[in-house]
Image: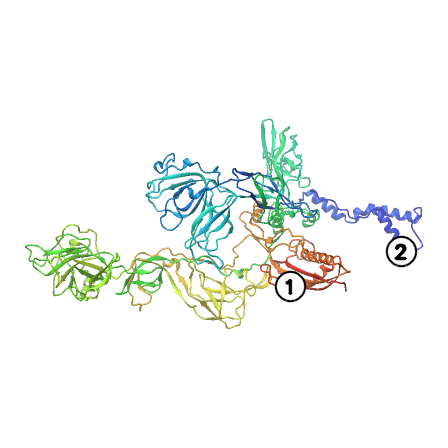
Amino acid sequence: MSLPTPEYDGRTRDEVVAGTVAAVRRKVGTWTGQDRTDPGRGLIETCTDMVMALRDRLNLAPDQRRLQMLRLLGVRPYRPAPAQTEVVLQLAAPSPEPVVVPAGQEVATRPVGEAEPVVFSTLTEAALNPCVLVAAGDFAESRKADGALEGMLTAFGPGVGRTVEPGGPAFAGPAFHLNLPYFGDFPPPGDAFADTGPVSTGGGDPPSSSYALVVLSVPVPSTRVTLDVSMGAGLAPKVGTGVTRGHWEAWQGTHWTGCRVVTDTMTVQGRPGKVTLDLPPAHAPAQLLLHRAAGEGGSDSVQRLRDVGLIRYRADAGRSPLTRVALDPVLAVSVPVVQAGLVRNETLGTATGTRGERLRFAHPPLPRSTDPLVVEAVLGERTAQWTYVASLAGSGPDDRHFTLDPRTGEAVFAPVVAGARGPRQHGAPLPAGAVVRIRRYLTGGGARGNVPARTITVLRTPLPYVSSVTNPAPAVGGTERESAAACATRLPLGSPVPERAVVPVDYEQLALAASAGMARIHHVRDAPDDALDPARNYLPWRPAKTDVAFTLAPGTPTLPAGIQVTTEDDETVFTTTREATRVPPDAMGAARLGLVPGVTAAVGMFEAGDYQADGEFSGPFKEGGGLVLALVEIKKPHDPGRLTLWVTAGGDRRPEDRIAVSVFAPSKAAPWWDTAAPLAYASAPAQEITLADGTTVFAHPVHVSGSARWQAAVAGGALVSTAPDAVDRQGEGFPTEEAACWIAVQILDPHGTPTTPYTVYADSGTTDPVPAEQYEEHDRAREPFSSTDKPGQVYPLLHSPVYVPENERLPEVRVGNENWRTVTSFHDSLENSKDVVINASTGQVHFGPEVTGGPSGTRQYGAIPLPPGTPITVDGPYKTTLGAAGNDIPAGRISRPKNPDDDRIVGVRNISASHGGKNGYTDTSGGSTQAGVTLMVVPFVTADERGWFPFHMLTPTRDACDTLRRSLRACQPEGVPVWLKQPVYHGIRIDARIVPADYRTADERAELRAAAERALYRYFSPVGGGPDGTGWPLGRPVYAGEAFRVLEQVPGVGRVATAELVPVDPLDGSASDPVVRIRCGPGETVYSVEHRVTVAEVPS
């Protein structure tokens, strides 16, 4: 498209003569000027010829020369861009064979009035493959490699279920089974490895993951499937729902990717519902290796399923699991469409082989469409391809590139440009005599393609089995071709569209030229608003971890989670995260002691019999005696300093019966048996205790740790840790590893016999190790603070650093009697938003600042805590941690409870070194490290007949933003990021009452009201509104008086009685009181939420 030369004076010669004659007649009333032979008339015509000759030089000659120069410089108006969306084609009934939707299939909107329908074409070929449900169940994955999944598929439900049979009766599909996997792929259990090749049987290793798996007979990419499902109980449901859902994912050949959930009617746990999913285009065939459960054909039975489609439901911890799955007939497939016509197999002509050759397309192509523009040159049996590039400046003489002339739309091949070093050829020429053709290209585009959702409903060419088509989402991205006038005014002389982005205007021009569906793009030049990001907690603080074991006081069976323990210096606090349970008394291995024949010395007088691991022993140490002696092993990890023994005696006994138990420290190197001075002694009735296996017995207690002699022996190292150190002679079966200690137990039983069995149980009060994390809980602020009346208040309110577990949030700040919301930034905070920002690293609490010079002018972000003097505290407990400083605390250094008065705890120690603590990172630079270029974008939208459009259409799509960034990436300095943001939209409503110029019927008054509202929607619009029709300018305030001017220009309006400007929230529609003016900052514009116009019945 070329730039036309404007006509500077639209009047013809006759019109100029007639105007001059009329001017003379006003001065000389007696002269008529009708006689063409009159000398005065001849003089006027002669002067007119002189004026016509000088008009091009003296009127608007500079503008004409400007346009001519721009045309010579190659200024290119912005090309139109097509709108894009996805359509869903619905089948009337299940098809026994694949239904193919070819590329180029045209769909359209329904015609409205005399307007032509908007036509879209499919970009790619899509196929809807009929499929059935082969199997479904809980899948325990054991291996994933080379595109294959391996594991065990069992029926839904808790526990170990039966193995699911693929293709069994539970998953019978429709009558046709054309797409079922070949059932030879399901070898019978007796021939598990028939034709399966080498497979891994799992080797008994635990599965790496478990989830619900749905196996389809074939993959169905870009297809909409509906599943009848039931879900079990999960976490507490959210308000209005009955289940807590997980994630639906599809297999893409090497990994899982998420599916879009279209509808989900699951509302009550256990009741059936339907889930509709859109599967991704890359849903790929999978190979599934299924193991059979033990007892169902052998533990090594494997079945192989080839080329199946897989869908999984992954439920996080506590989420609702699947309990039933059934597949509805597959009747819908989605395919991308573009607002353009697809031209196929067009011949451009025969090449001459000259430099700078030009060939014309039958229709203007869309070079920035998703399809690459490629032409073929066929000469004999040889075919070569030339690819379109936006500019041939970087193409050499051997590069098969071509470009398009923006004025004529012709394809240009191998132009020669004269330079300082002589002529240079850009691109390779076409071979002479070759037939040049293009297989396919798109033509079309325009803003009218931005149609709303569910409006593309016409299938222009019938397809078998396809009954309907619709677009679930609106089409976006369509832009109009730039007018010549707009192109001429936006560029200074000698400044075509830049090839490199350097200054802000370069970014604006190149972004608009990207045809990404943007109506307006503005470079943001606002002052930095560092105060809006006072503390951005990027990396959370993580506590160090360790395992601790407690020693509990007698009678204390458990300790709850949340017990705080500390090092000896009280500087590092750890908190247990699980309940600590006392280790039940367990039987100690023992051997009966007897006298060594012939030995009368005090040293070496005893020998030990065979070691009994169950701890049972009997019989006196000498014939005819009444004392029983036994060598008892106190196993690790019992603590000798905290030891309590429990001795059971066999036979019938009464509750009040007692036995006398003495404890000694045996040693083969020194005398140790002195019945008058045992290390510990007890004679108490039996008590009922519970053992580790859950059984209960009656045992006599011996509180060894309460004896001063025993404690002295422990402290003096008198206890031996191996049996050879205790006695010189031992029987068989003794352990070789070290024990906590070996003791000798003497029993005097008045009711005992030589065959009475005894067993010694040990209890040192220890608990099983429990995990502990290095954090300390606080329930109050570091110190009390009171507010002032100034913006941007900062208080060191919290102890720090603050640790926030994954399922918890930062503590809430209480101002007076109200909790304020904790946010990450003040960017989205309104003037009255009760928001605070917490610095997790320092514990500082920031209140909303006042920013001057930002995109909204001077503005308060977040409320100020008022009135002055209001107390500021923290609501509820919170945690603090030292991060990496809590690492590398050796075992045994954590040795005391933080509360020394807790009589439940006798002792504590960490059994492993602390590890895993990490320091967090909080950015306090205010976001100024986010360097780069920030562009404010307003997308093209398609309004309805009133001129209104939904607010969400002002949000650019991700595809449009990606297209814009890709286009800029090729011509901007490397490493400069581009940030896209939206303006702040002020929603408005005009409530007006107009009086017609004359009497009108009810229908005529309705038409006048519609015309008045249409004028308001079009004027107060961010896309095509404003005084110049290019969109409401950023930063321009809105006055109520402008509504009067707009309405008075509507044909048929006599006068405007009233017009009120009402601020309205564009998100929820809530309205405020009418105002005279709405102030807009530099980065703000307006959006018409609604306009209400009433028409008086009679003129007055």
Viewer-nearest of discs 2 and 1: 1
Label 1 element class = strand
Location of residue 31 with respect to 186 vertically, above or below: below
- Horizontal and vertical percent position of residue 661: 16, 63
* Amino acid marked by disc 1: Val
- Horizontal and vertical percent position of residue 483: 69, 47
**Screen quadrant of the C terminus:** bottom right
Q: Which mark is residue 26?
A: 2
Disc 2 to disc 1, how far (Cα)?
53 Å
* Residue at the outermost bottom position: 869
Q: Residue at x 17, y 50 (%)?
A: 733
Q: Is residue 1058 left or right of residue 927?
A: right
Q: Which mark is residue 1062?
A: 1
* Residue at the outermost top position: 380
Label 2 element class = helix
Location of residue 127 with respect to 1020 vertically, above or below: above
**Screen quadrant of the N terminus:** top right
- Dot 1 surroundings within 10 Å: few (below 14), some, or many (20 or more)? many
Q: Nearer the viewer, residue 1054 or 110?
A: 110
